[in-house]
Image (cartoon, rainbow, N blue to C red):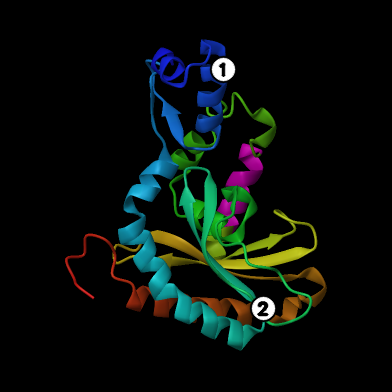
Amino acid sequence: MSDVAERLGVARSTAHRLLQTLVYRDFAVQDDQRLYHPGPVLELATHSQSHVSRLRGAALPHLQRLVDVLGESVNLTIRTVDRTRFIASVECQQILRVGSREGMVFPAHKTSGGLVLLADLSPEEVDDLYSSERYAQRPEERPDPVKLRALLARVRKSGFALNNGLSERGVIALGVAVRGVDGRAQAGLAVSMPSVRYDRQRLPSLVAALNRAAGAIEADHLPAGSGSSS
């Protein structure tokens, strides 16, 4: 913190507030010795030209085809710690629609894509991710652990996540996982629509279309470290 204060020419208290903001936004992390290091966002940027950009490039044509089939907006998300980041989004052409969320960040437990990614973690990993210690500076943002475990158990069992107004009132989203060659979830593929247009009877066909698109993305995407070339 003293190094930052000296480099920026500000008081230590100001440097402390700036660093805490960076930690809150995942641009920095603080270790047990209270030293600061680059956070998940910067780590993501380091690899953005490899894994994430290839995933996005492979997904975009399938997202467009999915929009043509479903008539609703679709997006692709990845998880960064306890948040999801929208790396690709294709809007439908309906007048009333969910707009592009590309580049936006939401709490992972409040998006359908984030929920399928969280459901891929072990219960111990989820407990650590949402521990009270990690949320000491923002306790109001911490989800109820019991409710979250029950929700993730339902997602694991069904193979999809339903988000009914969790991130935005009046919006419903369905999400499935896009998996790598190791079977682990790499991204969340979701369709979003105004709740007034959601028909529960369409749920099986929506999930089936999402799973087909996810499978096509998996077939086209070469995971980082696979040793293959495009």
Q: Which residue is mark 2?
A: 72
- The residue drawn where x is 19% and y is 72% is 229
- 124 up-or-down from 119: above or below: above
- The residue drawn where x is 54% and y is 76% is 210
- What predominant SS class does the magenta segment belong to? helix
Measured from the top left, where is residue 190 in percent x and y?
Answer: 57, 68
Quarter of the view holding residue 160? bottom right
Q: What amino acid is found at the position of numbered circle 1 in the picture?
A: Thr
Residue range in magenta is 144-154
**Left or right of 181: which side holds 83?**
right
Q: Residues within 10 Å of mark 1 (few under 14, many from 20)?
A: some
Q: What amino acid is found at the position of numbered circle 2 in the picture?
A: Glu
The quarter of the rendered structure image containing the C terminus is bottom left
Give the label on residue 14, or none.
1
- 141 up-or-down from 65: above or below: above
- Frontmost residue, 160 versus 187: 187
Measured from the top left, where is residue 196 in percent x and y?
Answer: 83, 73
Q: Residues within 10 Å of mark 2 (few under 14, many from 20)?
A: many
Q: Earlier in the sequence, mark 2 or mark 1?
A: 1
